[in-house]
Amino acid sequence: MTPPRGAPLEVIALSLRRERDRVGLSLTELAKRAGIAKSTLSQLEAASGNPSVETLWALSVALDVPFSRLVEPARPRVQIIRAGEGPAVFSERADYVATLLASCPPNARRDIYLITAEPGSARESDPHMPGVVEHVVLSAGRARIGLTEAPVELAPGDYMAYPGDVEHVFEALEPGTAAVMVSEHW
């Protein structure tokens, strides 16, 4: 019979800090919601102390996460979206499709899209919310992209960033034009 092992203190410490940051709570507020002493929570986040199952359970309830999220090491998450899959949104005014590849996770401020477009009508975008910046890497074809008043022609491999909170445009100049766009929200 093997002796009982202690709690995985480093995993618990990292998990508590990650989840507390995710929900935007101070040490004091999380301790209050969990019904534990602030000093106990501070020790746990410093990877010291000896947490009881009751303490960790109270913290998981206060953080609205499964108990396992606090005691299991984080596993790398692999996500694959094959070409032609994913939620696609079509433009009414241009031959333009935006396929969402990754939506903004908690505490991040960005979405990632695959843009496919064909020559013809340009996709003219109204301003988005203040502070949005769009990053585009053209992967195939050629396109005029950027501010409506001064778009720039891009070729495969070119990158550009521009404010998305003003009128902007994406105009394919060759068949099979494709780009990856990151919409960053400040």
Image (cartoon, rainbow, N blue to C red):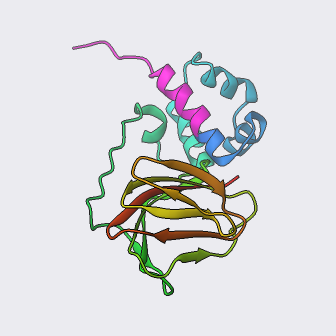
Asked whether residue 11 is drawn in magenta, I would say yes
Image label count: 0
On the image, the x and y values in percent for residue 163 come to 69, 58
The residue positioned farthest toward the bottom in the image shown? 92
Residue toward you, 75 or 111: 111
Asked whether residue 56 is drawn in magenta, I would say no
What are the residue bounds of the magenta stretch?
1-18
User: Based on the displayed image, in which of its 4 quarters is residue 126 positioned?
Assistant: bottom right
Q: Is residue 12 above or below residue 92?
A: above
User: Based on the displayed image, in which of its 4 quarters is residue 185 positioned?
Assistant: bottom right
Q: Is residue 172 above or below residue 186?
A: below
User: Would you say 121 lies left or right of 185 here?
Assistant: left
Q: Residue at x 33, y 50 (%)?
A: 79
Q: Residue at x 57, y 53 (%)?
A: 110
On the image, the x and y values in percent for residue 132 come to 68, 58
User: Based on the displayed image, in which of its 4 quarters is residue 47 positioned?
Assistant: top right
Residue toward you, 186 or 75: 186
Q: Residue at x 51, y 48 (%)?
A: 159
On the image, the x and y values in percent for residue 4 come to 35, 17
On the image, the x and y values in percent for residue 121 come to 49, 82
User: Would you say 78 lies left or right of 108 here?
Assistant: left
In which quadrant will I find the N terminus? top left
Q: Residue at x 38, y 74 (%)?
A: 118
Residue toward you, 13 or 112: 112
